[in-house]
Every structure is written in C-alpha cells, then in structure tokens.
Amino acid sequence: MKIVVAEEAGFCFGVKRALKLVNEYLTKGKQIQTFGPLIHNIPVLNDLAAQGVHSVDSINEIQKSKTLCIRTHGIPRQVEKQLYKKGISTLDATCPLVKKEQKIIEKLDKNKGRIVIIGDKDHPEIVAARSYAKNVTIINSLAEAKALPRAAQMSVVAQTTLNSEFFKHVVAILMDKVEKLEIYNTICQATKDRQLAVKKLAPKVDAILVVGSKISSNTKKLFNIAKEKNKNSLHIETCADLQKPRVLAKIAKFSNVGITAGASCPNNLIEDTLLRVFRLRGISEEEVRKVAGA
Amino acid sequence: MKIVVAEEAGFCFGVKRALKLVNEYLTKGKQIQTFGPLIHNIPVLNDLAAQGVHSVDSINEIQKSKTLCIRTHGIPRQVEKQLYKKGISTLDATCPLVKKEQKIIEKLDKNKGRIVIIGDKDHPEIVAARSYAKNVTIINSLAEAKALPRAAQMSVVAQTTLNSEFFKHVVAILMDKVEKLEIYNTICQATKDRQLAVKKLAPKVDAILVVGSKISSNTKKLFNIAKEKNKNSLHIETCADLQKPRVLAKIAKFSNVGITAGASCPNNLIEDTLLRVFRLRGISEEEVRKVAGA
C-alpha cells in the first residue's frame, strides 16, 4: 500500500500565526477568549479549551477581564468599534491577507466604485469584509454573475479561499458586461497551492482522503476539487471517521491513497490519519516509521 | 437549397462612418487622399479610385492640395504631429471606438501603470494605439501571456477586433500572476456581435462562406471561429472566388450554406455572393427574390 500526502496541505500561514499569537499570550499567563471558534478544527479547539481558552458568540458574553482574540476571518468594522467603545482589550489574529482584502474594499468604497465580492455571504470572512464598504454586491454562482446588470466600471474582490477556476469563470462572464473591470486576486497563495496540489494528486491515486472540518470553507473546496478528479474522494473530520464501515471498506479496497487537508488542519492530525490508515491495513506504526525513514 | 446570412455581418459602424465622411467630402467637390487603403476591401477601393480617391503610404507622398483622410485604424501620435507641423489638412475617420482605446492607453501612460495590449503588433490599429504610451507590452498568444513576469498591477487593453474567447483565456492566465488586474474590454460591439453570430450559425449549416479581404483582421477572426465550428468553412474575397473549382465543388455538395462577412465588406457584396451561390446552383436571381419576398 502507498499513501501520498499532497505537496501542499494543512495549516496555512494565517492559522499558524493565530495559534502562535494565542500561545504566546497563554505562555505569559494571560487569559484569552476568542470571538467565535478560533479555527474550524475540533481537536485543536479541545486542546485550547483545556488551556482555558473559550469562545464567545456575542459582545454580551465577553468577559472584560480577559483579552478577546479576533480570529483569522476578522470581524465587522462596526463590531470593532463597539469593542473599542466598551474598552475590551483585543488580540487581533485577523489573517494579514484577510486584512489586505478589507483594506482594498475600504479604499474602493472611498473611490465610490461599484464593488462585487465573490464568496459566501454567510462566511465570517465575508460578513467582516463587506462591512468595509457601504454598498457591495456578493455573488457566489455563475448564475448570479450572469444576472448582474451591465456597468461601465466594476471592482471585483475574492474570498481568500475561493476556488481559482471558479473565479476565472466568473471574471469571463463579467468581462462581457463591464467596460473597465478591476480584478483584485485576493485568493491567498496557500489556498491556490493546496487546490493545485490536490488537483495534481487526485487523478494519480485510487482514493483520496480530505481531512478537515465539515464547516471549513477551504476544506469543502478541496473536497469538491478532489471529487471532480477522483470519484473515490472522502471527507473526514477526525481519525475516528476512519473507523466508519463505509470509509473502512473504501480504504481496504485501494492500494494507492492520497491525503490532503484544509488550512485549519494541524500537521499531527494529518500524520495521525496516515498512521491510522496504515494500521487499518495491518501495518504497524513502527513499520511505517521505518519505511518513511522517520 | 437554403442560404442563411449570419444575424450580424458586414460593414460596422466605424467603416460606415468613414465612408460617409469621405462621400460627404467628395459631394462637396473636395479632393481626398487616404493614409493607407481606407478599408480592406478591393471593390470598395476600386469604387473610390474611380472618384479620384487614392491612397498614400508615407508622409512624403502626400499632396498638400488635397485633404488627407485618416482611416478607421487611426495613426501614430508622432505622425499626427508631423502632419500638423507640415500644415496638411486632415479628415479624421478614426473609428470612435479606436479613438477611445487610444485615450485609455494615453491615460494609463500618465498614471505610470504597466500596460499590456492584446493584439497584432503589426496591425495599423495597434501600431497607432501603442504610440499613446511610452512603454507597452504587446502580446498575441497564450504562450506570450504565460511568459509575462508576475506583477503587482497591470492594465490590459484589447485590439477592437480581438476574439472575445481568446481575450478571456489570456485574462485567466494573467489573473494567476497579477494582484490588481485592470481590464478594459475595448473589443467593439460589432466584432462581438459578428463573432457570436457566426459561432451560432456555423454548426447549423453544412458549409459556411466568410466574405472579406484576406488581410482584414476581423474577417480572419470570423473565419477562424467558423472553422472551429464547421470544417467546411471557406474564406472568399470576392464573388469571383466562387468560380474556383475547389469552392464550386464544396458549394455544389451542400444543401445548407451560411454566409458571414467582415466589417469592411459592403452589403452589396454579401448580396452578390448570395445571388451567385444560388446561380451556381441553377436558381435564377428572379426566383431568389421571389422566395426572399424582395
């Protein structure tokens, strides 16, 4: 049996940075709460909870004695103002690439141009990003792009985890209706790299495992790309999912299995998945480490 | 036998306007010379020659007693200045859409942005348009787009007769290498309409005739689109071409023939082609007019 991990997979720069910031705070003995779950990954959240880090969902739940960590997705501008007014101390772990996206939208708003964001209007990143302009149109399908009226000018910004190919299809549609189209390619490099890596890997293996939360936007996109190229694609959240009969049956059948993971999936979960897959096939951890030269 | 003319074909707005301007001048008894052939169409040029309109290829050939007509493609900025300096009176028949393209390039040059023109560097339109900026890069293939270096910002302008689909493919490539991509869709509506019409018509007929000059950029593109959709595509310059054995053989074989024509092809040439095709099939002009209800 052969298991191949995609060239680029797992934790991205923004997530690593957020966890580092939180850990530095914890090391200093400070207490932290996060605004919404820090990342879309249960094992990591459990680990943080064990260190006293808990998540709040609204301003009213915030404990003033603790620092409030703003997660990678950022928060809406008006919420930021409210926090400041209430004197709540914050640790801003907004991904710098998301911050850049927000700054672009803020600048476009000042220029009074027409702004279109391509992404999921309910995703926290977009809920926060859209707040940086008075008027934005959010689209997330080719049909919505086709339905947009003609315009002399339009500026387009993408959710950082958008599928690159989908972005290009939307732009091709908009090119037919806009005289001056300004495209900001705000898809982050980690997203592009992971998508490209799974696109390359999926057709070369018998089956592919996509590790990560079912509510993680970038993981869902990786899974969709994997599915397009390989019908034996499985989305698992934790190693426990590997025990499910349906998953087990699939893994047992194939001799070449690929693995990729979303940006909020820690490396140890990828490793654990690898080891579990081998174990399920009757190969011990020791043997694997021997083969892998670790 | 059925002959279908593409929904949009032949003379575009810019060519019609140029001929109207020249005819108005001639009606007033004024003498005209053109800078390069007024349009890429032999029968029309012969007709103009019969009215004393001749074409010059360089500034030295210009007769100061006659007005110099600048054709739809426009002329380089430095040539315009030379003409002004020499006191040569001009009639500017530059297509307003080409003028708009020049103004965009001029403005981009003032903003010191990176400018890429997609089109044929040897075509008179591009030779003129590029003169409006100190530095431009001209590309005309996907390979050239791929070879461009990464950039933070880039502005893209298209030759007015560019193939829309090709433009989209180039933009998709550039999206991977540019953070802020400004796209000016300067392809003229007549070009888009004619390309779309031939794309729709070509797969529905047994064979398709593309009428227009072999050196006409937009006609060549119509022919390429026709060929993609229908392997029995024929590019003819004049009705005389219909007598060629190869053409005759093809037309005789098919019962459904489509016709389209480049932007510099007058309606009477399209009509003549239609009638000739019918005549070649033994159907008289009278019968055709009866069927067509004319």
Image (cartoon, coloured by chain):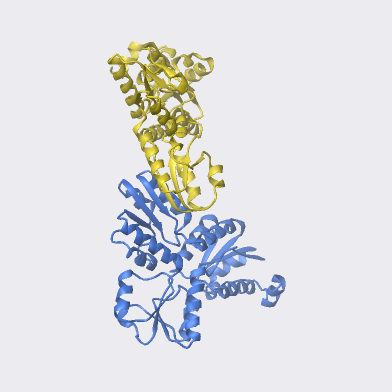
Chain colours: A blue, B yellow
Image quarter in which the C terminus of chain A is found: bottom right
- Residues B113 and B186: in front is B113
Residue A290 percent across, percent down from the top left = 72, 74
| Residue occupying image coordinates x 39% and y 45% | A175
The answer to whether A256 appears left or right of A218 in the picture is right
| Residue occupying image coordinates x 44% and y 74% | A93
| Position above or below: B92 against B55 | below
| Residue occupying image coordinates x 44% and y 49% | B113
Q: What number of labels is visible?
A: 0
Image quarter in which the N terminus of chain A is found: bottom right
Picture quadrant where residue B77 is located: top left
Can residue A290 be spotted in the picture? Answer: yes
- Residues A66 and A108: in front is A108
Residue A52 percent across, percent down from the top left = 45, 86
| Position above or below: A31 against A272 | below
Picture quadrant where residue A32 is located: bottom left
